[in-house]
Image: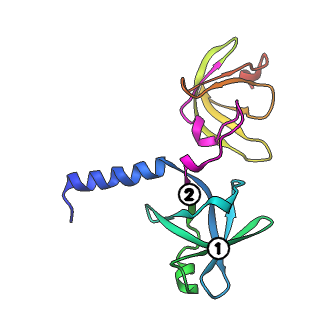
Amino acid sequence: MPSPLVRAFLFSQHHMDKILCYKIGYIAKTHGLKGEVTAVLSEAIDLEDVKSLFVEIGNDLVPHFIESFSDRGDKTFFKFDDIDSTEKANALKGCSLFLPKTERPKLKRGDFYDDEVLGFSVEDKTQGLLGTITEVSAPGPNRLLTLTYNGKEVLIPVNGPFITSTNKTKKLMKVDLPEGFLDI
């Protein structure tokens, strides 16, 4: 058993890895008999240049090198180098897939990835500081920012006229909410 100091270091290394990565989907089931898996990807990613994915096994992100992949509509089939049997593939069922944030495509000015704005302060043009973003969700077709204002949960649509600017350096998002929006 490693000493508490070594354990803390190992935990921080693992923890840091996850912070430096973002989830792109999960492995839904096995496919075929040679160890292929079917993945459902939540992010539209050009996989041509991606050599490996991180698979979340327990609390660890384990790199798996991609031997081949094929896209069929809403599903992607992966064959990983070291997974060569249905049993090995079955062990990955339900595991989340991650990529390093450094490999994420750059977005147009004003656009942001959901996990990038967590903890950002939200400031309204007339009401001033409202709170900090605790979650970005997509219960339907629209993404929603969640924050707590005066003890109430407030949901602000991402698509639409409300967000006037996003400053990633200052971790500040400015909004212009219609009168009465916060009273709902």
Mark 1 vs mark 2: which is more N-terminal?
1
Q: Residue at x 58, y 69 (%)?
A: 94
Residue 68: numbered disc: 1
Magenta run includes residue 176 = no
Residue type, numbered disc 1? Ser
Q: Kindly indicate the quadrant of the structure image that contains residue 131.
A: top right
Residue type, numbered disc 2? Phe
Q: Element at badge 2?
A: strand
Q: Residue at x 65, y 46 (%)?
A: 105
Magenta run includes residue 122 = yes
- The C terminus lies in which quarter of the figure? top right
Q: Residue at x 55, y 63 (%)?
A: 53
Q: Element at badge 1?
A: strand
Stretch of the chain drawn in magenta? 98-123
Q: Is residue 143 visible?
A: yes
Pointer 2 local density, CA inside 10 Å: few below 14, some 14–19, many at least 20:
many
Query: Would you place residue 96 above or below residue 83 in this image?
Result: above
Pointer 1 local density, CA inside 10 Å: few below 14, some 14–19, many at least 20:
few
Residue 125: numbered disc: none
Query: Would you place residue 14 above or below residue 83 in this image?
Result: above
**Farthest residue toward the left?**
3
Q: Position of residue 4 (x, y in %)?
A: 21, 54
Q: Nearer the viewer, residue 160 or 24?
A: 24
Alpha-carbon span between mark 1 and mark 2 = 17 Å
Residue 98: numbered disc: 2
Q: Residue at x 52, y 82 (%)?
A: 88
Labelled pair 1, 2 in contact (Cβ < 8 Å): no
Q: Is residue 150 visible?
A: no
**Farthest residue toward the front?**
49
Of labels 1 and 2, the one closer to you:
1
